[in-house]
Image (cartoon, coloured by chain):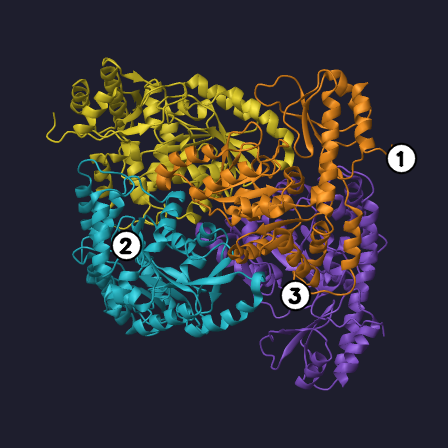
Chain colours: A purple, B orange, C cyan, D yellow
Amino acid sequence: MSPVSRKDFTSDNVAGASPEMLAALATANVGTARSYGADDVSTALARRAEAVFERPVTILPVATGTAANALALSILARPYEATYCATTAHVMTDECGAPEFYTGGAKLLTLASDDGRIAPAQLTESMAVIRTMGVHHVQPSSVSISQATEWGTVYSRAALAALADTAHGLGLKLHMDGARFANALVHQGCTPAEATWKSGVDVLSLGATKNGAFAAEAVVLFDPALAAEFEFRRKRAGHLWSKMRFLSAQLLAYLSDDLWLRNARQANAMASRLALGLTSIAGVALVQPVEANELFVSLPDAVTARLRAAGFGFYDWPAPAGFAGPVYRLVTAYDMSADDVDGFLATARG
Amino acid sequence: MSPVSRKDFTSDNVAGASPEMLAALATANVGTARSYGADDVSTALARRAEAVFERPVTILPVATGTAANALALSILARPYEATYCATTAHVMTDECGAPEFYTGGAKLLTLASDDGRIAPAQLTESMAVIRTMGVHHVQPSSVSISQATEWGTVYSRAALAALADTAHGLGLKLHMDGARFANALVHQGCTPAEATWKSGVDVLSLGATKNGAFAAEAVVLFDPALAAEFEFRRKRAGHLWSKMRFLSAQLLAYLSDDLWLRNARQANAMASRLALGLTSIAGVALVQPVEANELFVSLPDAVTARLRAAGFGFYDWPAPAGFAGPVYRLVTAYDMSADDVDGFLATARG
Amino acid sequence: MSPVSRKDFTSDNVAGASPEMLAALATANVGTARSYGADDVSTALARRAEAVFERPVTILPVATGTAANALALSILARPYEATYCATTAHVMTDECGAPEFYTGGAKLLTLASDDGRIAPAQLTESMAVIRTMGVHHVQPSSVSISQATEWGTVYSRAALAALADTAHGLGLKLHMDGARFANALVHQGCTPAEATWKSGVDVLSLGATKNGAFAAEAVVLFDPALAAEFEFRRKRAGHLWSKMRFLSAQLLAYLSDDLWLRNARQANAMASRLALGLTSIAGVALVQPVEANELFVSLPDAVTARLRAAGFGFYDWPAPAGFAGPVYRLVTAYDMSADDVDGFLATARG
Amino acid sequence: MSPVSRKDFTSDNVAGASPEMLAALATANVGTARSYGADDVSTALARRAEAVFERPVTILPVATGTAANALALSILARPYEATYCATTAHVMTDECGAPEFYTGGAKLLTLASDDGRIAPAQLTESMAVIRTMGVHHVQPSSVSISQATEWGTVYSRAALAALADTAHGLGLKLHMDGARFANALVHQGCTPAEATWKSGVDVLSLGATKNGAFAAEAVVLFDPALAAEFEFRRKRAGHLWSKMRFLSAQLLAYLSDDLWLRNARQANAMASRLALGLTSIAGVALVQPVEANELFVSLPDAVTARLRAAGFGFYDWPAPAGFAGPVYRLVTAYDMSADDVDGFLATARG
């Protein structure tokens, strides 16, 4: 076991940054550079993004996931329009109304979900009602899904494509909140292109912070025509860095040498290891399948007590409908080792 | 002269970050930390800010100056209110409407200014008219000044206190856009407390990015009662970092060991050296007094041509009223050496 | 039966205005008057409102119910706050996002409701969760209820007081959307004071349009301290009439000589008569109790066909959960006679 | 002189409504009608508007001029854009920030004006600067002019066409605030088509309230493609009347039988009569040419004192630059008679 074991399973945002990130900042810090994104690092990032996604894209860095999502939604929904999302969506529950702020008051229309995913029929049914309401109801323009979802599940490529087809058929654009996109991607085992635009995603919020960056996310626009409006909105929101090279440098490092995939694989592997170990303990049950780096588990009180006493951190979580007993969320991250997980399991077993 | 001379005088945001900043990030990157500001570095920053300002304050880090200003104004002006500023104010001309976005459409009411400063009588005169207009006109709630100003000038302590007294007497709060606060502070030669709340400043946007940080600014609230609303607005705007330690670490380094003052002194000294050298050249004139790290100068065309040919960078600038001939802005920064300045002067002299 | 029978049961807004309203406009139209509410009619309305509600109030006329509700909510919820309402609430489903527009993006948080009413425990349970989420979730500041509800039901005085007590205990203000307030009031059989502030209502949207006005609603503030902000917001929204006397005249007529109560009693009586007649027809069932002037009924297809063929108008309505068969909404109004209702019933019986 | 002389010259909004308006309401009040604009009166208005403007147009009634202007601007400027207007524009100074509210924070960029009009060169010069500022400055999308202006002047057809040409060449749409459009129209002596779209106006706020209606204005869209967005925004703002027939009836009466022109001619004639009479008094001077129904005059103190003592109402007005002595605004209206004006003049002469 490492000298200081890694005992905090509350969130992947308690981790620091990958060493590669610090090195990238140091390299980018040499000399002067043009500001607001006209620097060489930002240019290299733009090229790298096109290589990764195998097509012309516009990649627009910001520092937080809330900013990425809210800006993305602001170009997809006018104030008198709406965006569908799951009841569990981060944009709905954890961003303090950022989408409503950025869109000028467009609505988020929630669709019930047991596992964080929404289904095509939900869109069709809701739209059938809302279309009849004319000017009395905000009209949906878009759908926002989380990949991986807030329940740690992942849309399969087929499920994603089906949802996108239905959305497009209804005149809705598809936004993907990819705060944990890399975790979903390595689970799916397909290419970034297949996981996004080839499956019908129009706009991607690409997370890096939870997976190794200091603070770096990006909005990836698969339709370059949206870029101009986005850039004005980003500036207006105070999310255009003057020393943009330092934001771009993180994202360039992230997308280079497979860092994002390596980090995500480690996080996911630790989640699988943890799930495997926990389900061998009597009284422990998984609430959701483990497909990325989050576990939702029911733990016997004695197990919980032992873990808390030993200093392990993890959150209580609202139990889903039809599920009795206390539920907890456990989050692994790229900086966790097998020893860290095994330490948790050893304590859990008692 | 250094191996690579520093030839870009377009802005202080072309500079990289101080070595101390990189070291601070590396130190803060050890181990896990609680997110959203509940970490030890953020706590240390809060204490440091209180020491620097000699009183209880709330310091709220964000990544950009536009965010700092817009958030600050959003807690000082309701949507049906207004904020006074100079016609030249960054909040008016360079933030793509961020104040209007963050306040929900409050107005910026501009006051004419030759040198970037506004005078107490301007407030009194305008308020006398607007107060009579009742609900037909947005009512001013606040004043925003830049220190140092966008013309490179600095409010004296007396001028600042007089403006604050008048503002408060009219029921207006005083916001200071301190994107270059450290440059103004070392020019004034007083304490941070004297330069702010002791002179009547209610809310300060404290800049660090232009003076040595990667990307770090802070809003300093001298009235802690404003903090709760601010925190909701910051989250809602996507400016609350999950890994807040990395934003706090920059600001803590900035306010420690006099880094902010050392950097600002160097930038200001280079501006003075440049001003002194330039004014000894025939045909060169200063448009404004040089009180911080920005120079506004009229240059003969031949001088301009030599500098451009040699690769020196600087912007054309709109000439102020009553000033003939082409005007340019030159900005020095903490990372410039006397050799850099002398190189510029040598080329200018031809 | 009257020469032209009244066959349109789609909504109470298909009715014209009471003769008293036209007379009131004619009277108010004599001579010049000060604009923006400084006229004698508006002063008389202010006095009349205080007499009706038996206490100092501020009454603020606007032309539409959406404006009244959205303005009311805008002074009760900051952009980073939220208002609870039923899933069926007009503010949620029929105002095209007006609350979000007027509040600057505050959220409406919906509470499930079978009959249009919400219960105290729903507030308590939701708040227990949301309070723990801090800045990550908009924090509720208020509750909006409809009286009568969109299902034609009415909160009893006891139910209203219990809800208000719970809301106030949680720090929430209570707004009542009284688009059909008079219909609810005559059903309750209590005083306007008892139906509002004596039961804990903080702000009332008082409807008149559906009950006899051309276009007139009012926001009644039981806390005069809220008036100043409201007046700025009303002007800013374009809802301050320059010739305010013509809006005030309608409301003054409405609240005088029991016009509002007489009209509401007629509408409610016609709804009761219609309910009584319909429920004597085989296969007809009421979906909700009839407590105001709206009926929600299940009709056999043959009945529906006969009515439609005879030119009677009424809307299809989404059937509530657990209710099979086609459901329809029937709305009576002050201008309907017993003959009109009997004509409907005769056709329904076939 | 009439039994009760008409002594209030403060504004045209102190007048009541024309008898034709009351008659129109009475006629429209017969029977039931479909709500939200699907009624016969609204259909007739749509046809009438097309006849008046000699082309397909969309006419969208609202109750106030502020609503008409703010809604018009909201479809012409995105939140990160701007609208040019004169410093004196009603949208800038008298609507409590309604344009900023409705647009979501777009800026009004003011152009200096001595007489309420702006000139093509002002647009060209300002755009040349702003275009260079990229995302750092909101980019203009539109121009809003007042016709007649707030100084009582009228753009000639040639001046209007020149301004429109320049605006269009710069990619800017042209909005006309026609709160006193009829007054301008009868001054120009051309057709409504010539005064608007044939001269390049894209969107017109057509006032009726100041010229004989109870409360009725309309936005006229010469580009029908803008109508859908407008209708959502109108509903969302609470400006869609449920009993729309009563708003449409006023506008239909206004545009029928030359009522609007007759009323405007009377108001303008009274202004001319007043101007002629006043300028024959020693010490009286016109500050602006009198081209519609507003006069701005300098009066000797003795004259002012006599008028005030006799009960005549009129406002003090800020003197324009370079004009000494107290200035007053006098507004005539359709309901003023020659006797009323002569009474004013007789008192003024002493």
Q: Marks 1 and 2: same chain?
A: no
Q: CA distance from mark 1 to mark 2?
A: 81 Å
Whole-percent x, y for residue C32 in the image: 21, 35
Task: State the quadrant of the C terminus of chain A.
Answer: bottom right
Res B147 → quadrant: top right
Mark 1 lies on a secondary structure that is loop
Frontmost residue, D157 versus A241 = A241
Count of numbered tags? 3
Which residue is label 3 attached to? Answer: A150
* 1 vs 2, front mark: 1
Amino acid type, residue under disc 1 in the picture: Pro
Tag 1 near tag 2, CB within 8 Å: no
Q: Marks 1 and 3: same chain?
A: no
Which chain is indicated by disc 3?
Answer: A
The label number, if any, that marks residue C258 in the structure image: none
Which residue is label 2 attached to? Answer: C208
Amino acid type, residue under disc 3 in the picture: Glu
Q: CA distance from mark 3 to mark 2?
A: 46 Å
Whole-percent x, y for residue A228 in the image: 65, 39
Which residue is label 1 attached to? Answer: B3
Residue at the image position 61 percent from the left and 43 percent from the top: B66
